[in-house]
Amino acid sequence: MSASKEEKFDKMLFQALQKHSEPVPADFTDRMLRQIREAENRRILAHVVVEERLALASCIVLGVMAIVAVAAFPDIAVSFKELVGTSIDKITQTIGGHSAELSRSPIRYEWQLYAVFAGVVGFAVCSLTDLLVNDS
């Protein structure tokens, strides 16, 4: 709680206590402030839980959509498998290529594909790091 909010709360509490005729326990203000902090923490926690549930639901929906797409359109799965297979073949050829072949290197002509792969891998690493580091 900020200092101005606490001062306003203390002033309101002081005025209310002066009008009050029953004895008030000494730790009354501390208990009230603790209850306010706990209510704020519960609200924040509820917000985080909703965000996590939405993220989980979107991952599940995305997975189901991918499965349905593969089942409904098997040509997409086959073409994706061929794309990944040819890309892996090009990577192994590039790594195992001879110096004469390096001038005709697949990287030279397929650099966009490798840039996309690097972006996907980078995104996956960043997502995993964010997931694991922020939870601790």
Image (spheres, rainbow, N blue to C red):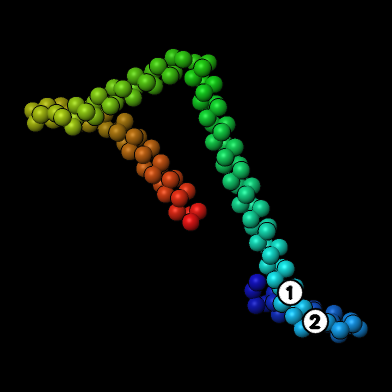
Q: Say which residue label 1 marks.
A: 31
Residue 117: give x, y in percent of width and height.
Answer: 34, 34
Residue 21: give x, y in percent of width and height.
Answer: 91, 83
Question: Pointer 1: residues within 10 angstroms few (<14), some, or many (20+)?
Answer: few
Picture quadrant of residue 17: bottom right
Which residue occupies the extreme left position in the image? Answer: 100
Which residue occupies the extreme right position in the image? Answer: 21
Give the residue drawn at x 24%, y 29%. 91
Give the residue drawn at x 38%, y 37%. 120
Question: Pointer 2: residues within 10 angstroms few (<14), some, or many (20+)?
Answer: few
Residue 96 visible in the current orientation = yes
Image side of residue 102 versus residue 72, left or right: left
| Frontmost residue, 102 versus 70 | 70
Answer above or below: position of 32 versus 119: below
Image side of residue 83 versus residue 73, left or right: left
Give the residue drawn at x 73%, y 74%. 31
Answer above or below: position of 74 versus 47: above
Tag of residue 86: none
Q: Are marks 2 and 1 in contact (CB under 8 Å)?
A: yes
Image side of residue 116 versus residue 98, left or right: right
Picture quadrant of residue 12: bottom right
Disc 2, SS = loop
Q: Say which residue label 2 marks.
A: 25
Q: Amino acid at mark 2?
A: Pro
Answer above or below: position of 101 versus 6: above
Residue 30: give x, y in percent of width and height.
Answer: 71, 77
**CA gap, disc 2 and disc 1:** 10 Å
| Frontmost residue, 105 versus 98 | 98
Q: Name the quarter where the N terminus is drawn.
A: bottom right
Residue 103 visible in the current orientation = no
Residue 5: give x, y in percent of width and height.
Answer: 69, 74
